[in-house]
Image: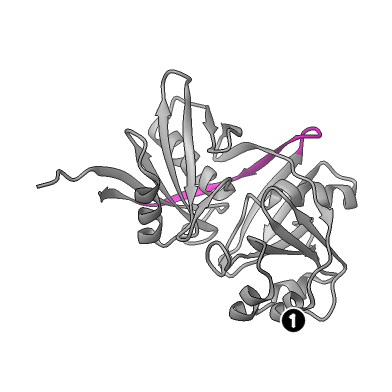
Amino acid sequence: MKTQQAIATYIVDAFTDQPFKGNPAGVCLLEAPLAVKDMQAIAKELGLSETAFVHYNADVSKYAIRYFSPKMEIPLCGHATLAASKVIFESHLEWHTIRFETIGHIILDISRKGQYIEMEFPIYETLPQPAPKAVLEALGLEAIVNSAYNTETRILLLELDDSTVLRELTPDFERLVRAHDSINGVLVTALSKTETYDFESRYFWPWSGTNEDPVTGGTHTFLAKYWGTRLDKTKMKAYQCSERSGFMDVELLNASKMLLKSEAQIVFKGELFL
C-alpha cells in the first residue's frame, strides 16, 4: 500500500484586509518538489484561480515558487505570491524578507512592513493592438478609449472612459472564449471616480483560468506603467472592482522594477494527502 504524503495546505485571501474578500489562493508548502502532474491535479482539486507551490532551498536561501490554475501552469501570479508570503511570514515571525524564484527564473523580493507585504515585481510594456469586435460584443461594450497588448502575460488591455461601466460589465463568457484564440485573458480598466483610488480594473480569463479573477497582481506588472504614464505618477492606488473586490498600492521604482503592496488573510489551514 502506497504511503500517503501529507502537504501543509492553506487558503489565503489576498489583496484584502478582510476574510472572504480579495482573491483566494491555495498555498502548498512542500518538503520536496512535486511532479507537474501532481501540482496540476492539486490545483484542479482546490478549484481556486491559482495555487502556489513553494519549496525552500537552503543552499541558495530562497524559495522556488510555481503557480497553477485549475487548467494550466501560470508563469507569474501576484495574489498567490502574496498569499505564500503571508503563510511564510506567519510561520517565521522573526523574518522580515523572503526571496522567491519563479519557473521563469524571475527573482521576487518580498518584505513585511507591519500588516502590509511589499512585493518587488518586474515592469512589463504594452503595445498597441486593435480589439476584435467580437471581444467587445462578448463583453457588452460599444466603445473603448484604447486597446493594447502585453506580450509576457498574453493579456489584452481595454481602457474604458467610465468606471461605472466597468463595474457593471456582465460578459458572455462562452462568446468571449470563441472571440479570440491567442490570448490568456482580457484586462478592462478605467480611471476611478473615487478619491481613494487612481484606477480600477477587472480581469476576465476563461481561456486559461476561471471566468473572472477577483484581484490580479500580475496584471499590474503592465497596468501600473500604463496608468503611470497617463497620470504622470510613480505611486498609485489600484482597486479591482470584482464582486469580491480588492486593493493594492503600486509604485514604479525604475524602468524595470515595481512594488505591489497590500494585505492578506489566512482563512484555512490543513493537510492535503497525495
Decide which of 68, 85 is in the foreground and name it. 68
**Residue 80 falls left or right of residue 31:** right
Q: Which residue is mark 1?
A: 137
Residue 163 screen position, x and y as percent: 78, 70
The residue nearer to you, when weighing 135 against 164, is 135
Q: Residue, x 53% and y 66% (percent of image)?
A: 210
Spot occupied by residue 199 in the image (x, y as percentages of width and height): 77, 58
Q: Quadrant of residue 129?
A: bottom right
Q: Quadrant of residue 101?
A: top right
Would residue 79 appear left or right of 200 to someone viewing this image? left
Which range of residues does the magenta coloring cover? 252-268
Image coordinates of residue 158 in percent, x first then y, are 78, 65
**Residue 200 picture quarter:** bottom right
On screen, 55 above or below 57?
Answer: below
34 relative to 151 in the view: left or right: left
Identify the residue shown where x is 68% and y is 53%: 219
Of the pair 152 and 92, the residue shown nearer to us: 152
Left/right of residue 53 with respect to residue 166 in the rendered view? left
Identity, as a three-letter code, of the amino acid under mark 1: Glu
The reply to whether the magenta stretch includes residue 267 is yes
* Mark 1: secondary structure: helix
